[in-house]
Amino acid sequence: MRLNIGIDGPVGAGKSSVADAVAARLSILHLDTGAMYRALGLTALRRGIDVQDEEAIVALCRDLGVSVRHEADGQHTFVRGEDVTGLIRTPEVSMAASTVSRYAQVRKEMVRIQQQLASETDMVLDGRDICMTVLPNATAKIFLTASPEERARRRFLEMQAKGMSDTYEQVLEELKKRDDQDMNRPVEPLRQAPDAVLVDSTHLGFDEVVDEILRIVEEKSHG
Ligand code: DC
């Protein structure tokens, strides 16, 4: 049986780095599904398409040609063959990704691609709707969270290290706004699946979170 692990959670919970480490320990791939919504958001911004215009965004999504490839340094995300990995991490693209992810037809297309990839290979997938929609039969389901202040603090330090000038208050405000949008959209809003295990990392170190998730995976695989 396929080993498919789903990790959902709000902005800045550390899903992506934790999923990377869990995948590395299990020698399987990690699919960062947020990168695909980011690729769509980036392309809309670049082409001057209004992210509030559902019809235009759905048309763009159908024609996007988004793909991912796993290389030695992790996942690379492509739009029609162009590597956009380095361009999709700005706050503007984050907000645009959150907005375009509200549209049902966009989600349908992204979920289709993600399910196809997960059916081909053992993987850890991280996102917002993995445990409820993308992988309803996942081997293990995790809901990873932390307090908004702690998530903002971590994201702020990350951004500082990259030389970005946003203040802690700006980061916290953006995080709350995006969480609100992701949790209150009508289609597949972010929520903990009833059969997902809650991991609150507010007072846990990175390695402790990874070990806890590996323990849950072990338990679910043999349980
Ligand atoms: O995980 P992230 O911050 O890179 O995701 C960017 C946005 O994409 C997020 O605000 C909501 C959306 N998203 C989603 O709706 N479903 C997913 N599986 C992953 C991301």
Image (tube, rainbow, N blue to C red):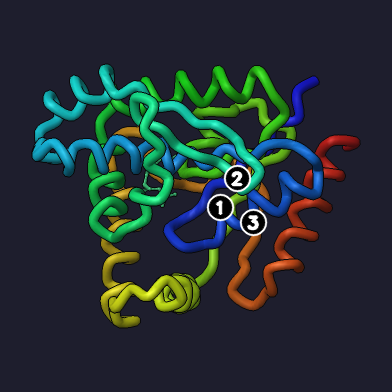
- For ligand 1, tell me if the residue under mark 3 lies within 8 Å: no
Label 2 amino acid?
A: Gly
Q: Which residue was labeled with disc 2?
A: 74
Give the percent coordinates (x, y) of residue 39: 34, 38
- Between residues 68 and 11, which one lies in front from this camera angle? 68
- Between residues 163 and 171, which one lies in front from this camera angle? 163
Query: Under tag 2, what secondary structure?
Result: strand
The Cα–Cα distance between marks 2 and 3, rounded to whole angstroms, is 13 Å
Q: Are marks 3 and 1 in contact (CB under 8 Å)?
A: yes
- Between residues 161 and 130, which one lies in front from this camera angle? 161
- For ligand 1, tell me if the residue under mark 1 lies within 8 Å: yes
Label 1 amino acid?
A: Ser
Q: Residue 16 carries which label?
A: 1
Mark 2 or mark 3: which is in front? Answer: 2
- Between residues 189 and 86, which one lies in front from this camera angle? 86
Q: Which residue is drawn at 43% across and 42% down?
A: 35
Mark 1 or mark 2: which is in front? Answer: 2
Label 3 amino acid?
A: Val
Q: Which of marks 1 and 2 is nearer the N terminus?
A: 1
In the picture, measured across the screen, residue 7 lies left or right of residue 81, that is right
Q: Which residue was labeled with disc 3?
A: 18
Quadrant assignment, res 217: top right
